[in-house]
Amino acid sequence: MDSNQKAPNLSQGQDYGVFLPMLFALLTLVVWFAFQTSQLLKERDDLKTLNANQEASYANAQKMRGQLDALAAGTARLAQNGNASARKVIDALKAKGISVNPDAATGK
């Protein structure tokens, strides 16, 4: 190799500069944001569906809770009026830490 020969200059090839890598990076970013947006919209719809499905169960639970409260209040009123069986039930509930208000509104 002659000392006067120069190594080939790599910059003589086709030079894209910064444009092509930036274009790919921005395109990738846009695709990522679109994917994330579609996933979030799907999750939001799924949560709305779950909420709608739970509303009926929640309404039934509230109705049952009202009926149970009315039953307990009726039992407490019977216990106040001297019914021995009702008194035993109320005493058992108190032993378990459950207080019953005899003046509670009646259930549906």
Image: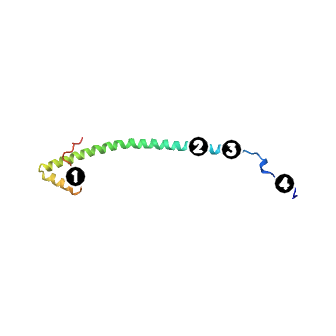
Q: Provide the residue designation for mark 1.
A: 99
Indicate the amino acid at tag 4.
Lys
Q: How many discs mark residues in the rendered view?
A: 4
Q: Secondary structure at mark 3?
A: helix
Q: Look at the image and name its color scheme.
A: rainbow
Disc with the residue nearer the chain's start (1 vs 2): 2
Where residue 31 is drawn, which disc sits there?
Answer: 2
Where residue 6 is drawn, which disc sits there?
Answer: 4
Mark 1 against mark 2, which lies toward the viewer? 1
Indicate the amino acid at tag 2.
Val
What whole-number distance in Å separates the C-alpha atoms at marks 3 and 1? 74 Å
Lateral position of residue 6 relative to residue 99, left or right: right
What whole-number distance in Å separates the C-alpha atoms at marks 2 and 4? 45 Å
Q: Position of residue 92 (x, y in %)?
A: 20, 56
Mark 2 against mark 4, which lies toward the viewer? 4
Q: Provide the residue designation for mark 3.
A: 20
Number of residues whose C-alpha sits closer than 10 Å to that of mark 2, classed few (under 14), some (14–19) or many (20 or more): few
Residue most extreme to the left: 82
Q: Position of residue 31 (x, y in %)?
A: 58, 43
Mark 2 against mark 3, which lies toward the viewer? 3
What whole-number distance in Å separates the C-alpha atoms at marks 1 and 2? 59 Å
Q: Position of residue 99 (x, y in %)?
A: 22, 52
Mark 4 against mark 3, which lies toward the viewer? 4
Disc with the residue nearer the chain's start (4 vs 3): 4
Labelled pair 2, 4 in contact (Cβ < 8 Å): no
Number of residues whose C-alpha sits closer than 10 Å to that of mark 4, classed few (under 14), some (14–19) or many (20 or more): few
Question: Dividing the image into 4 quarters, which one contains the C terminus?
Answer: top left
